[in-house]
Image: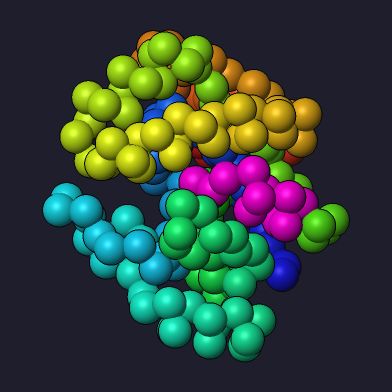
């Protein structure tokens, strides 16, 4: 993978329900230079999700074919479904855009193996009481799914040390501002003249 050195790649990871997808979309909406790396997944789309915008929704068989073709920079099985980052998707985007990745710690570990790539890795977290409230409030998961996601919080959280920054997302706007400041710091230190 080769890319314009002005462009940066930001990874946002968190336990399920902490808000990384919402924050990813806020960054993309505010800053036109940022494109979201749209992952492939085998899970079914939610009612408000659009194929090719939120995810590329594919069958398990198709996903496994893509694995065999070495089509992913990273992939993982999470809560019975596969998720993966397409090499073609990233290679196209990075030539003329900044990229933001909405991926978990497993994906971050795999992407980090590509030493020539310069990532800014941000891990988001909240306290477990607040997480439980959010998971139950959003009405997108069954009780069993909520139990699994809540249980995975501790396993996800032990990977904090793999990240450059750890932010607590108790307040969406405050957390968004912190992410903005991190991005601006890295854009400024990389290229003073780059418009952001």
- Say which residue appears at 73% left-offset and 50% top-offset: 109
User: Relative to residue 133, is residue 120 drawn left or right?
Assistant: right
**Residue 161 as seen in the image, left or right of residue 54:** right
Residue 61 visible at all: yes
Q: Residue at x 64, y 43 (%)?
A: 105
Determine which quarter of the picture holds residue 130. top left
Q: Is residue 192 visible?
A: no
Identify whether 19 is placed above or below 51: above
Foreground residue among 152 and 57: 152
Which quadrant is home to the N terminus? bottom right
Residue 101 in the image: state x and y as whole percent.
53, 49
Instruction: Tell me the quarter of the picture where residue 32 sits.
Output: top left
In this rendering, position of residue 71 left or right of residue 143? right
Q: Is 83 contained in the magenta span?
A: no
Most extreme residue toward the left is 47
What colour-coding does the image apply?
rainbow
Expressed as whole percent of the image width and height from the top left, the position of residue 84 reads 53, 64
Query: Which segment did they paint magenta?
Result: 102-112
192, 59: nearer the viewer = 59
| Residue at x-position 47% and y-position 16% | 128
Q: Kindly indicate the quadrant of the structure image that contains residue 94.
A: bottom right
Magenta highlight on residue 105: yes
**Percent x, y of residue 192:** 68, 33
Report the front residue among 102 and 161.
Answer: 161
**Please, is residue 182 above or below residue 193 in the view?**
above
The number of numbered discs placed on residues in the rendered structure image is 0
Q: Residue at x 61, y 27 (%)?
A: 154
Magenta segment, prevailing SS (helix, strand or loop): helix
């Amino acid at each position: 993978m080769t890319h314009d050195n002005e462009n940066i790649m930001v990874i946002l990871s968190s336990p399920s329900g902490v808000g990384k997808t919402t924050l990813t979309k806020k960054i993309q909406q505010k800053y036109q230079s940022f494109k979201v790396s749209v992952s492939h997944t085998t899970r079914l789309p939610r009612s408000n999700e659009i194929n090719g915008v939120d995810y590329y929704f594919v069958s398990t068989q198709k996903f496994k074919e893509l694995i065999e073709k070495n089509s992913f920079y990273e992939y993982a099985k999470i809560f019975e479904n596969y998720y993966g980052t397409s090499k073609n998707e990233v290679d196209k985007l990075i030539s003329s855009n900044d990229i933001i990745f909405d991926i978990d710690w497993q994906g971050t570990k795999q992407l980090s193996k590509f030493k020539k790539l310069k990532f800014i890795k941000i891990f988001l977290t909240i306290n477990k009481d607040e997480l439980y409230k959010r998971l139950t409030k959003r009405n997108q998961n069954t009780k069993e799914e909520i139990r699994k996601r809540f249980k995975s919080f501790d396993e996800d959280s032990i990977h904090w040390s793999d990240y450059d920054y750890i932010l607590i997302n108790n307040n969406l706007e405050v957390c968004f501002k912190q992410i903005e400041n991190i991005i601006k710091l890295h854009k400024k230190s990389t290229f003073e003249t780059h418009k952001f």
